[in-house]
Amino acid sequence: MSDQVKRIGVLTSGGDAPGMNAAVRAVVRTAIGQGIECIGIRRGWSGLISNDFVRLNGSSVSHIINKGGTILYTARSEEFMDRKGREKAIGTCKLLGLDGIVAIGGDGTFRGALALSRQIAESGQKLSVVGIPATIDNDIGCSHYTIGFDTACNTAVECIDKLRDTMQSHERCSVVEVMGRHAGYLALYVGIAVGATAVLIPERPLDFENDVIENIRRARLAGSTHYMVVTAEGAASAYEIANRIKDEIGIDPRVTVLGHIQRGGSPSARDRETASRMGYEAVQVLMAGKGNRIVATREGRIVDLDMEEALAMTKEFEMDRYDVLEALTNNDSFGFGR
């Protein structure tokens, strides 16, 4: 049992991601195993302001590792961004006697955690915060992988595979928009996995003629009668892409915006395992007396990084994967899905 850490809080904030529950479970079970009390803060930073919390024990987190969403709920809080709002949150931390908080979420979640810790430090007190990256966008600069990404990829692939069945039957072109915010990881991974005719990502300037029209023409000349274009939401609107395809080559595409379905569903084995390791490590970090840290994956290992330094990091986009996509598309003699 830790002599310094007696009670910690755990919360999920921002957009939900499959695997968040697995991370919560790991935090709670690891803490309890070390004699540390665990408080679940519901609805993210908003719950810390409004005293919305629940005591967690082993049974509280039983049978949740396979569930999507988050049992603690999640929200974004405008009030917490203001100093006065954080002052209310500090009051809750004092009321609960928290020695640390594990915050599960994305970039905004971590910036909020750092601001809270600094504001508490101004009064001569200490609250250790540790972040766990969970977002389907996989866009946290300090971590090579974020919880939820694999499940979101699998969900998108499953949906597109079903679209392919009807596209083949009706000899159609489909334009599918996936999530990802300002990052193209989800679109690129999914595009490779489904054998897309074209993939549009924000990290690569769009050359519509070469990236879309020429790929469709090549597939058509090779005998294909159905085509798939995958676009990241941060690259281009699926409706705009569909209209341009219709205007330039006369094909009338069908548009599918997958939207929030990508955030749901039972987490994959990878997301459950990664979340479990990260949750365990977060408690170990707190027990070691460290604070203002982010638990991250780096070169296949779970590490903890200084939160301020981690938030300044950028992730180099894996453009070599786009090279793979282009090689397979440009040499595709059979069209989409081969």
Image (cartoon, rainbow, N blue to C red):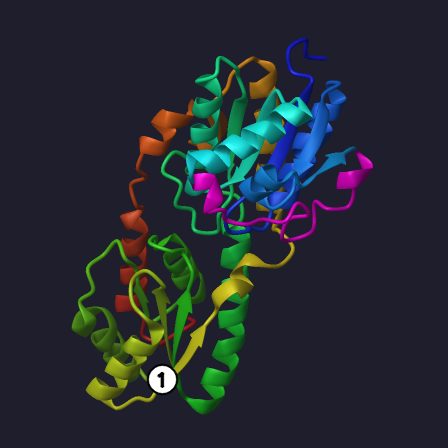
Name the secondary structure under disc 1. loop
Residue 170 lies within the magenta run: no
Q: Residue at x 52, y 15 (%)?
A: 125
**Image check: 309 left or right of 103?**
left
Q: Residue furthest right?
A: 59
**Image check: 12 left or right of 320?**
right
Query: Can you tell which quarter of the image residue 324 is in?
Result: bottom left
Q: Residues within 10 Å of mark 1 (few under 14, many from 20)?
A: many
Which quarter of the image is occupied by the N terminus?
A: top right
Q: Which residues are magenta?
A: 58-81
Q: Residue at x 36, y 76 (%)?
A: 335
**Residue 192 in sight in this render:** yes
Which quarter of the image is occupied by the C terminus?
A: bottom left
Query: Can you tell which quarter of the image residue 196 is in?
Result: bottom left
Q: Position of residue 223 (x, y in %)?
A: 33, 84
Task: Characterize the magenta stretch by its predominant secondary structure.
Answer: loop
